[in-house]
Amino acid sequence: MMTEKQLKNTILQEAIEGRLVPQDPNDEPASVLLERIREEKKRLVKEGKLKKKDLEETPISEDEKPFEIPDSWEWVRIKAILSLQAGKNVTSADIHSEQNDVFRYPCYGGNGLRGYVKNYNNEGFYPLIGRQGALCGNVNMAHGQFWATEHAVVADGWGMTDVKWQYFFLIALNLNKYATATAQPGLAVSNIIEVPIPLPPLAEQKRIVAKIEELLPKVEEYGKAQEALDKLNEELPEKLKKSVLQEAITGKLVPQDPNDEPASVLLERIREEKKRLVKEGKLKKKDLEEKPVSEDEKPFEIPDSWEWFRLGDIGLFERGNGIKRDETFESGYPCVRYGEMYTKYKYAPTFEKTASYTCKSVFEKCRKAHKGDLFMALTGENKQDISLAAQYVGDEEIAVGGDLCHFTILEAYGLYFVYLINSIFFSSKKELLATGDIIVHISTDKLASIPIPLPPLAEQKRIVAKIEEVFKEIDKLKASC
């Protein structure tokens, strides 16, 4: 499917080859127009406004003609129908960003409007060709009183050809291809004036301009529609995934199985496991405390076999240690820093290989995570990205950097909680609890306090399998767009 730019270029190519509007046998042919231009140039030479060399015409060989043109047209060089004159330098200090009573006149450079200046060096209606920089060869229009810098070439047709026609055909010539291939590309006026251009009859020039101006608004509408469609195609897969996750955490993605051990039994096993860890000194007695989820905190209904619980009650949160940038290397001991949650592992449900390594001394002082642990960043640039979760599935012990926490799930299925934490439901909860504007923070205590819907263990696994199945189909849809 064509882009807006491609469609516009196609229209201009049709125009420059004489296929955009029909030829009229009653039109005065371009050869007669060309003779009038020659006479006008002779008059301007006599008046001292042109030089004798401006009357010189170099024949155009057949090899220089890239396409056939109608019989009533003529191939000419740009210098035969246009005078090209670069403007004059103006310092940046003399250019104002906004127009006012002092800085009245538009100032055009190689890439178009630069700002406004106190004086003008041109007056009229002209195409301007940029002759310096990566965008050299671009064409703009200027009218009234304006200043053209040394990087803008003013094209003057002495009133003999249609100015808008000049503008459109100069764009169609793609003058950038004549630029010098240097670090700072540029267009020499001496080269531009030798470029061949097809000259239609004056009456046809006006018809061409009218047709282009009729079509361009439609092309712009097409471009906006295409942009909206592209945006929809880009956003739709993520929206679909978010909808799938919402269905998953409300118990609507897979059917319940009455033979499943209910979530209440799973919670009791988690409580027993935590008691064991208290006895071993790995948890404190306060970690056994549970704050019930009130009815007001339950935003939706869940199946009878599910339970509302707080995230911190089904696992162990531990914050990482600071690992400085200059303490990371291309090899060494594996570690994870919080920024990697936004780059390497953003929206990835799992990761196996670390992206960073540190030295032995830093590794030994850091807290460690193990296979199956979930990682969440506690600091970020926006509330949407903080605490996105990814599960570590590698076999190596891994050091946990600062502003990052790891979460060890007890008894339950870790991947279910990755998808739960990355859902709209959980995101909305953490956004309410996060603080900061420029840099956003959330604590492990606040994350632990968020109520979550907990399915039976067997259903957690069915939910994850269905999510991954549906996500694969969504990714195929995205690839085909």
Image: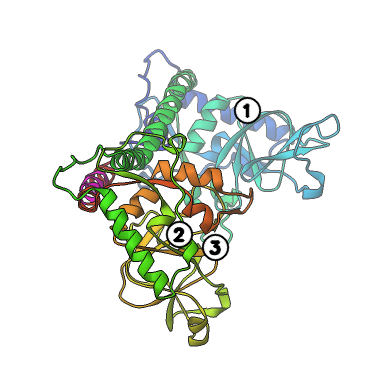
Instruction: Inspect the magenta stretch and tell me whether residue 473 lies in it.
Output: yes
Query: Disc 3 designates what residue?
Result: 182
Who's the residue at 45% across and 24% down the image? Answer: 212
**Is 383 on the left or on the right of 61, as rendered?**
right
Q: Which residue is mark 2?
A: 376
Which kind of residue does numbered mark 3 sit on? Thr
Q: Amino acid at mark 1?
A: Glu
Q: Earlier in the sequence, mark 1 or mark 3?
A: 1
Nearest the viewer among 234 and 433 is 433
Q: CA distance from mark 2 to mark 1?
A: 76 Å
Q: Is residue 162 visible?
A: yes
Dot 2, how many residues are within 10 Å of its Cα: few (below 14), some (14-19), or many (20+)? many
Mark toward the viewer: 1 or 3: 3
Q: Earlier in the sequence, mark 2 or mark 1?
A: 1
Residue 399, how many percent across, how many down? 45, 75
Q: Main secondary structure of the magenta part?
A: helix
The N terminus is located in which quarter? top left
Q: Are marks 1 and 3 in contact (CB under 8 Å)?
A: no
Query: Can residue 137 be seen by looking at this rendering?
Result: no
Quadrant showing the C terminus: top left
**How far apart in space, not on screen, are marks 3 and 2 (Cα)?**
48 Å
Left or right, 284 with reference to 250: right
Q: Position of residue 259 (x, y in %)?
A: 13, 46
**Disc assigned to residue 132:** none
Give the mark nearer the N terminus: 3 vs 2.
3
Q: Nearer the viewer, residue 139 or 289?
A: 289
Badge 3 element: loop
**Residue 347, percent across and down?**
38, 53
Q: Residues within 10 Å of mark 3 (few under 14, many from 20)?
A: few
- Which mark is on residue 40? 1
